[in-house]
Amino acid sequence: MARGLPFPAFWLGFGGLIPFAACAAGAFIGPEGWRGFALIALIGYGAVILAFLGAVHWGLALAATAEAETRHARTRLTLGVVPALIAWGALMLPAWAALTVLIAGFLGVWAAEESGAREGLVPGRYLWLRRLLTLSVVVILSAVLMGLLFG
């Protein structure tokens, strides 16, 4: 799959980092009464985005036409569902645990995408974009987690 990505995928992807950064900042430097809300909003947004990442793979599985790609349909469909289940579970945990689960979820999807790319199942430009976005999200969530645990 050597298809490129439409340009809006880049600016929408990077625009999707704004709520992560804004909520993280709000959790640390926002008005005292809003910090807890910002933390809950960050966890909720992280869960939504993690579920969205799974949906990408569900779409890739349904769009697959080549025999080599359809052989991987079960794995792709599973990857389409598991991130949403992880995200949903994270919503029921204390903040420090929810952040830990979300970080692990984002890293797990990243690892699965890297593996899929080696088999030609993930477009290269998509993977480049996912690397940058996932790294940014993991850094933001990790900073908030460290702030909760040690700050």
Image (cartoon, rainbow, N blue to C red):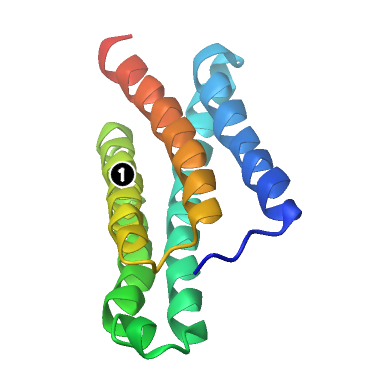
Q: Viewed as shown, does residue 56 lie left or right of 19?
A: left
x, y (%) of residue 94?
Answer: 28, 38
Please determine whether, in this image, residue 52 is positioned above or below residue 34: below
**Residue at the front extreme?**
2
Q: Residue at x 28, y 31 (%)?
A: 96
x, y (%) of residue 109?
Answer: 33, 54
Give the SS element for disc 1.
Answer: helix
x, y (%) of residue 56?
Answer: 49, 67
**Residue at the top extreme?**
151
Between 133 and 39, the one lying in front of the other is 133
Image quadrant occupied by the C terminus: top left
Please determine whether, in this image, residue 111 is positioned above or below residue 80: above
Amino acid beneath label 1: Leu
Q: Residue at x 32, y 39 (%)?
A: 103
Q: Residue at x 47, y 89 (%)?
A: 65
Between 33 and 146, the one lying in front of the other is 146
Is disc 1 surrounded by few (<14), some (14 to 19) or many (20+) residues within 10 Å? Answer: some
State the count of labels: 1
Q: Viewed as shown, does residue 97 lie left or right of 42?
A: left
x, y (%) of residue 47?
Answer: 43, 51
Q: Residue at x 71, y 59 (%)?
A: 6
Q: Which residue is mark 1?
A: 107
Q: Viewed as shown, does residue 122 lie left or right of 108?
A: right
Between 141 and 66, the one lying in front of the other is 66
